[in-house]
Structure formats: structure tokens, C-alpha cells
Image (cartoon, rainbow, N blue to C red):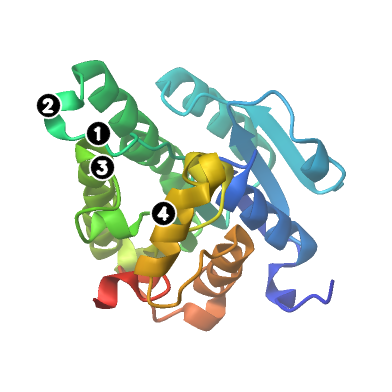
Amino acid sequence: MTNLYPEYEGKVVVITGVASGIGFEQAKAFLENGARVFGADLKNAVPKLQEYANFNYQQVDVRRKNEIKNWAKMILKQVKVDILLNTAGILDDYAPTLETSEDDWDNIFNTNLKSMFLLTNQILPQMLAQKHGVIVNMASIAGMVAGGGGAAYTAAKHGIIGYTKQLDYDYAAKGIRANCIAPGAINTPMNAKDFENGGAMAKEVAELTPAKRWANPSEVAQMTLYLASPRADYVHGTVLTIDGGWTEK
């Protein structure tokens, strides 16, 4: 693959949720552009990424503060982090509030939102010390409109957008850039249920999307490469949608 972003050569990127889907493609894209990537997920191995010499993997449950803290400490003892991608997330099967238990609510929020807060607070002090750092959080169209998830997922994704904006507002003058990406229908293992039983749900989603298709996770990864690069240096606290026109309706 041609190195389209030579500026990533030797840069250090930390990514959660690298075992599959968007996180996997983000890790692969940065690795192929010369970055050193520290990735984490619940799975105990990611063979396809571990073929890269500049990839370091750790099994981490991002819902657990101690696991995040230990992982971050291990990284910061070795390197200085340039880019943090908070990508890990789970769905809630579109459950409305009366079908959402307190445990379900906490699980969604701890995985999708609190993990970003915990990991960011581990990495951010070092970024501030070097007066430079880029943070890209994974939001969703569910953080902008209803219908993209259930009560917990939608609330958490709205929270991600608010957290990202405030994060950038508080630290932009100190060399930090924080933005988030809001994907629509992305064909990842997380959305596998939509393709079951003949894919009726997947077809309906595509039909309701102005672009009439699902996106591949690699498309989100390519957007991330731009957003995290110096080419986007004046892009601050924004929500970059990649939804085939879903939110234009």
C-alpha cells in the first residue's frame, strides 16, 4: 500500500477496540502509514495485526479502571503518545428505556463513554507536557438523532459528542485537538444481526440511507487518518459524520 500519510512515520497511536470493525481498520491504516500502534480489546489476540512489527497488543476490558490504568502506564513508560483513538463500543439492540435494565445501562455507558474519560485522563497529562496531542472519539449518528440505537446507546453517544467538545474547548490552547466521528450504517461484526435471516434489516437500512448502501469500516479509517493528521490542524471540537446522508434527512 502506498504511504499516503508520511507524517505518521514513527508516530505513536493508541487505539481501543482493535479486534474487529472500525478499530481494526484504524489500526491497520495507521500501521500501513508507518505509525507505531498500541491496541487493546477484550479478545486475547488479534493475529492479523500482530503480523506488523510496529503493533503492540494488550487484552484490556475498558470498563475496568485498573486495566485501563495499567495499560496506559505500560505504554507511557515506553513512549510518548501522539494520537489517542477511543473507538471501543457496544450496541444495545435498540432497546427502549422500559426494556433497559440498570445493568444494561451501566454496561453501555461504561464501555462507550466512561472508558473514554478514563483513558483520556491517563494519556492527556503526557500530551499536555509535550504541548501536542490529538484525540479522536468514536461517536455515532445516534449521538445526533434518534433511531440509531436504543435509549442507553443514544444517550451515551450524545454524551461522547458533548464530552469531546468540552475536552477540546478546555485544552485547545494548550496544543490538544479533540474531535469525534459519527458513523451511520457501517458493515462491521457489531452490526452482524442486521444481516441475519436474509439480511432484511440490512436492506431496509440501506434503502433508508440516501446513498443506498452500507459503508465499509475502512472508509471510517481513512477519515480518521485525515482527522488525526496535521492537515486537519484547524479542525477542533467537531463531529465529522460518515453516514451516507442519513442525518441530512
Is mark 3 in CB contact (under 8 Å) with mark 4?
no
Residue neighbourhood size for the residue with mark 3, other residues' Cα within 10 Å, grouped as few (<14), some (14–19), many (≥20): many
Look at discs 3 and 1 and give the one toward the viewer. 1
Residue 98: which disc? 2
Residue 225 position in % (x across, y down): 59, 69
Q: Residue 224 lies in what quarter of the image? A: bottom right
At 81% from the left and 43% from the top, the residue drawn is: 48
Q: Quadrant of the C terminus?
A: bottom left
Q: CA distance from mark 2 to mark 4?
A: 28 Å
Q: Secondary structure at mark 2?
A: helix
Is mark 4 in CB contact (under 8 Å) with mark 1?
no
Q: Secondary structure at mark 3?
A: helix
Q: Quadrant of the N terminus?
A: bottom right
Residue marked by disc 1: 95
Residue marked by disc 3: 156
N-term-proximal mark, 3 vs 4: 4
